């Protein structure tokens, strides 16, 4: 019996010694790292909601109220149509492209060596004329863009209107561009082709490229119609994006009840 007592006493002393050693280790860790091992670590179960976007209704305090997806879609389309209308009006005048740094059409990248060569040979005025006429063609053609864009906007199905409304400043414009770029290009290209001929850009550029090829012995070619069509459409989209940003951030630009109701629900 006495033997069992001694064994139990020894075990208790051993456990006590181990506890003292462990306490000493914890104090040393706390002194060195600031981590208190005495505190129980707690774990939080991860949420099933993986959306970390800052534009969610919860994080931004947005209250869409009773707005339906159809109403939101109508508001987005109205903003886009307004952007197209105003954008085309600004672009479809003399210097609308040429003196607007946001949309000015520059020398095609493929032909920039032509620009440098002509300028080095004292023919900078010819290069300048070529660039100006590209912009003149865009200014002439863009007046035909409004109904083409309007049709694209009307026929576009916005499948995730709420997320677009809660997106960044140009989310609706970006969505429109992704859904209609090819359609717009096909419909708009003949208009640009006609404008290139109307302002004389095709003749001037034929002369520019011919002179460059004769001077360098090269055989450079380019599709000006494709280039100007793409740049003109991109120019309209830039103007639409600018208008969308304004409507989202400036209540004074929400000039209709639909715009006020839809974009007024989003508190930036």
Image: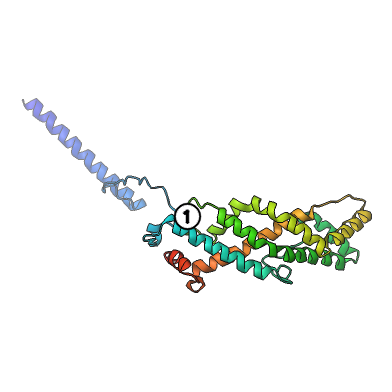
Residue at x 93% of width, y 51% of height? 217
Judging depth in this view, the residue of 139 and 164 nearest the camera is 139
Query: Tag 1: Cα neighbours inside 10 Å, few (<14), some, or many (≥20)?
Result: many
In this image, 218 relative to 166: left or right? Answer: right
Image quadrant for the C terminus? bottom left
- Image quadrant assignment for residue 126: bottom right
In this image, 129 relative to 100: left or right? Answer: right
Judging depth in this view, the residue of 35 and 259 nearest the camera is 259
- Residue 256 x %, y %: 49, 70
In this image, 262 relative to 118: left or right? Answer: left
Judging depth in this view, the residue of 139 and 53 nearest the camera is 139
Residue at x 48% of width, y 66% of height? 259
- Residue 140 x %, y %: 74, 65
Q: Secondary structure at mark 1?
A: helix
- Residue 188 x %, y %: 70, 56
Residue at x 75% of width, y 53% of height? 226
Number of numbered callouts drawn: 1
Tell me, yes or no, if residue 174 can be seen here. no
Extreme residue toward the bottom, this view = 252
Tell me, yes or no, if residue 144 can be seen here. yes
Which residue lies under the disc numbered 1?
161
- Residue 127 x %, y %: 84, 64
């Amino acid at each position: 019996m006495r033997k069992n007592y001694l064994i139990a006493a020894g075990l208790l002393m051993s456990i006590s010694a181990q506890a003292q050693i462990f306490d000493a280790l914890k104090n040393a860790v706390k002194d060195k790292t600031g981590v208190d091992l005495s505190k129980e670590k707690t774990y939080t179960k991860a949420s099933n909601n993986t959306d970390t976007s800052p534009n969610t209704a919860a994080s931004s305090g947005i209250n869409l109220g009773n707005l339906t997806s159809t109403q939101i879609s109508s508001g987005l389309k109205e903003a886009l149509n307004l952007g197209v209308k105003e954008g085309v009006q600004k672009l479809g005048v003399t210097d609308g492209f040429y003196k607007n740094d946001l949309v000015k059409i520059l020398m095609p990248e493929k032909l920039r060596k032509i620009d440098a060569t002509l300028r080095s040979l004292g023919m900078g005025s010819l290069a300048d004329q070529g660039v100006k006429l590209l912009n003149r063609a865009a200014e002439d053609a863009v007046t035909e863009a409004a109904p083409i864009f309007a049709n694209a906007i009307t026929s576009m199905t916005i499948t995730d209107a709420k997320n677009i409304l809660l997106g960044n400043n140009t989310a609706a414009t970006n969505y429109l561009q992704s859904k209609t770029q090819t359609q717009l290009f096909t419909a708009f290209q003949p208009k640009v082709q006609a404008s290139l001929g109307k302002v004389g850009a095709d003749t001037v550029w034929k002369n520019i490229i011919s002179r460059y090829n004769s001077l360098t012995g090269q055989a450079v070619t380019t599709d000006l119609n494709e280039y100007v069509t793409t740049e003109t459409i991109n120019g309209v989209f830039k103007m639409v994006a600018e208008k969308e940003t304004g409507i989202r951030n400036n209540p004074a630009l929400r000039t209709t009840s639909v715009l006020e109701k839809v974009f007024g629900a989003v508190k930036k």
